[in-house]
């Protein structure tokens, strides 16, 4: 479900073979991201480049992860957000809930792929 690359205390995460974050996948994604952000001092960039749609359960997961990261002293960012997803974030008035950035394409070693 997630492709996770790690370099030091920095994680790059993206959905693997899925282009939607919806009710079908949100629980699994939430569990896997929680494990990462609950480690103090880590930085997690969630690359949404290939994601074209996020439903309300997906946004609830992302808000939960952002809140958990803050409580545990780690960072959580949404990266490479597509125009469609950005529009949903604006329509739902969630711009202030997330840190949004653009991730550079770097050569990365895959830590693990989780189903």
Image (spheres, helix red, strand yellow):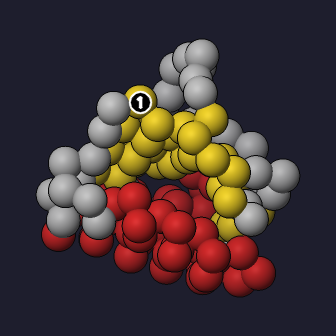
Q: Position of residue 5 (x, y in %)?
A: 54, 38
Position of 13 relative to 103 (above/below): below
Left or right, 99 with reference to 47: left
Q: Quadrant of the C terminus?
A: bottom right
Q: Position of residue 100 (x, y in %)?
A: 41, 44
Q: Mark 1: which secondary structure?
A: strand
Residue 59 shows in this picture: no
Q: Nearer the viewer, residue 102 or 34?
A: 34
What count of labels does the image hold?
Answer: 1
Neighbour tally class for label 1: few under 14, some 14-19, many 20 plus, Cα within 10 Å: few
Q: Residue at the location (67% across, 40% down)? A: 49
Residue 9 shows in this picture: yes
Q: Residue at the location (35% across, 52% down)? A: 76
Asked where in the image residue 98 lies, by quadrant, the reply is bottom left
Q: Which residue is mark 1?
A: 7
- Please, which residue is most extreme toward the front here? 111
Q: Position of residue 81 (x, y in %)?
A: 58, 43
Position of 2 relative to 82 (above/below): below
Asked where in the image residue 27 lies, by quadrant, the reply is bottom right
Q: Position of residue 84 (x, y in %)?
A: 70, 51
């Amino acid at each position: 479900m997630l492709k996770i690359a790690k370099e030091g205390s920095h994680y790059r995460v993206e959905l693997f073979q899925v282009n939607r974050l919806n009710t079908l996948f949100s629980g699994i994604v939430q569990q896997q991201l929680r494990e990462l952000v609950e480690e103090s001092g880590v930085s997690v960039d969630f690359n949404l480049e290939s994601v074209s749609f996020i439903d309300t359960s997906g946004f609830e997961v992302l808000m939960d992860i952002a809140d958990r990261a803050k409580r545990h002293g780690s960072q959580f960012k949404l990266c490479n957000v597509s125009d469609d997803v950005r529009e949903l974030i604006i329509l739902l008035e969630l711009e202030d809930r997330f840190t949004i950035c653009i991730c550079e394409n770097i050569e990365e070693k895959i830590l693990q792929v989780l189903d």
